[in-house]
Amino acid sequence: MIYWILPTVIIYIIKYVKIYTYPSLPEITGVKLISVCGVSGSGKTVLCKELEKRHYYSILYIDCDKLFFEECIGDSVVFSKKLRKLIKNNKGNTLIFDGNYKAIRKEVWNRCDEIYYLDIHPMYRIKNVITREFWNWWNNRTNEIGRPANFPMLIYSAIIKSNQSLIWHASGLDFHKKQLDEGVIIYLKDSQEHFQRHVEKRNERIKSGQTPKELQNEPAKITYLKGRFEIYHFEIFIITVVYLLYFVYFNSFL
């Protein structure tokens, strides 16, 4: 019976003691085009839906996983066209795009007002992926890409085919995070160069007495939203676990 004490207390602490704090919701004012990116399990969908709720559902939320896999059937060309059409047909509305696709960086980021990168600790990304898939599977729901959730397969793929596992993606140790980070660097470099060329050409037209084109907005910057550990609560957690380990070890010899 005593061996049940340790896991029970640890689960209770993880569930009820606030060890890790997620970033606060960003403030949004006026009509804007927003993109949210981050590694699997970062909480992109939760953040977008909380923003949608805060603004009384006046924000149009675009779930790019469902858009790509369900409406566009995995066709990148159709997906790009769909993104452009959504932006064109919703001028005057606030849109928030949730996803990491290359097409989003090309079609959305270059038109964005705000880009948020959810930078959550890998441990919590993995936890989010596992719990999300488990409850979707338990309740016979589809997963984030519209397919039937399969929790046993998630665990199997993590053990046998780690490079194809969503858990591996969430850890940030595979190509997904590297690809996202490289995409951010490329976007920042290319968008600044494009804007600089636009300013130079516009200035040349002004000097030559020609009517200049309207000055474009500066490229959207990447805002990193980081979570943090609550040190005080984390210390309580570690001390409690160490104490319980000692307690179980000591009593095992009685």
Image: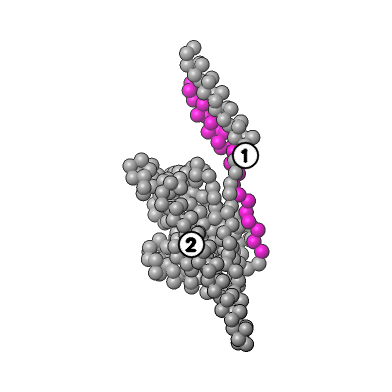
Q: Which residue is mark 1?
A: 230
Above or below: residue 112 compared with residue 20: below
Residue 243 point in image, percent of width and height: 56, 23
Residue 223 counted in the magenta span: no
The residue type indicated by label 2 comes to: Ile
Residue 115 position by quadrant? bottom right
Q: Is residue 145 left or right of residue 19?
A: left
Q: Is residue 59 left or right of residue 66?
A: right
Above or below: residue 253 compared with residue 229: above
Q: Are marks 1 and 2 in contact (CB under 8 Å)?
A: no
- Viewer-nearest of labels 1 and 2? 2
Q: Which residue is mark 2?
A: 186
Q: Is residue 188 left or right of residue 26?
A: left
Residue 159 position by quadrant? top left
Q: What's drawn in magenta, residue-wise?
A: 1-29
Q: How many marks?
A: 2
Query: Regarding mark 1 in the picture, which secondary structure is present there?
Result: loop
Above or below: residue 144 compared with residue 212: above
Q: Residue at x 58, y 27 (%)?
A: 240
Residue 28 counted in the magenta span: yes
Looking at the image, tell me whether mark 1 or mark 2 is earlier in sequence order. Answer: 2
Residue 84 shows in this picture: yes
The residue type indicated by label 1 comes to: Glu
Residue 5 shows in this picture: no
Residue 147 point in image, percent of width and height: 39, 54
State the residue lying farthest toward the bottom.
209
Residue 64 point in image, percent of width and height: 47, 61
How busy is the neighbourhood of tag 2: few (under 14 within 10 Å), some, or many (20 plus)?
A: few
In-front residue for pair 238/75: 238
Q: Residue at x 57, y 76 (%)?
A: 200
